[in-house]
Image (cartoon, grey):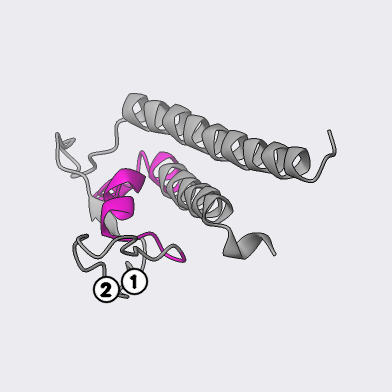
């Protein structure tokens, strides 16, 4: 039932994105001392929304809208992070990874808040509190 409501689909996509990014941050942190390891990051959720979130297709709601097509972003892609590198070729910065982890938690909390608000609206619309 909830998978057809776009608000819940967007919250689900945001939660999945946060989970993938948290896994990448954990992988970067675990390999902080691995020679030659290159830190990776996930394409930001806002960029995915602009191109279509997996499971949330873009659609034209008016005839004058640009053609949204039916193409979805095929997957969340990981990108190598540019920046400094240690003499052993590793470019993981633990401080940067900690900041990313905080941002991921904030994104996950935001998705849960959207989901809760949607449930509250649904309960209110059927007369329950």
Residue 21 x %, y %: 43, 47
State whether residue 10 is above or below residue 55: above
Look at 52% across and 56% down and name the residue there. 6
Q: Is residue 64 left or right of residue 5?
A: left
Residue 16 forms part of the magenta stretch: no
For the magenta stretch, what is the residue range?
27-55
Residue 20 x %, y %: 46, 53
At label 2, counting other C-alpha atoms closer than 10 Å, the crowd grade (few under 14, some 14-19, many 20 or more) is few
Residue 81 vs residue 31, the one in the foreground: 81
State whether residue 1 is above or below residue 14: below
Residue 34 forms part of the magenta stretch: yes
Residue 55 vs residue 59, the one in the foreground: 59
Label whose residue precedes the other's in the sequence (2 or 1): 2
Give the SS element for disc 2.
loop
Residue 95 x %, y %: 35, 24
Q: Is residue 33 left or right of residue 7?
A: left
Dot label at residue 93: none
Residue 30 figure quarter: top left
Q: Is residue 2 left or right of residue 16?
A: right
Residue 52 figure quarter: bottom left
Work out which quarter of the rendered image holds the C terminus and state it.
top right
Residue at image mark 2: 69
Between the residue at mark 2 and the residue at mark 1, the CA separation in whole angstroms equals 14 Å
Residue closest to the far front: 63
């Amino acid at each position: 039932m909830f998978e057809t409501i776009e608000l819940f689909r967007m919250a689900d996509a945001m939660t999945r994105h946060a989970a993938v990014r948290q896994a990448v941050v954990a992988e970067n942190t675990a390999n902080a001392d691995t020679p030659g390891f290159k830190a990776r990051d996930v394409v930001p959720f806002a960029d995915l929304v602009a191109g279509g979130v997996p499971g949330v297709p873009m659609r034209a709601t008016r005839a004058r809208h640009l053609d949204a097509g039916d193409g979805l972003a095929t997957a969340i892609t990981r990108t190598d992070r540019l920046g400094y590198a240690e003499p052993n070729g590793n470019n993981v910065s633990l401080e940067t990874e900690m900041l990313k982890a905080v941002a991921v938690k904030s994104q996950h909390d935001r998705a849960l808040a959207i989901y809760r608000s949607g449930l509250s609206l649904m309960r209110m619309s059927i007369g329950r509190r």
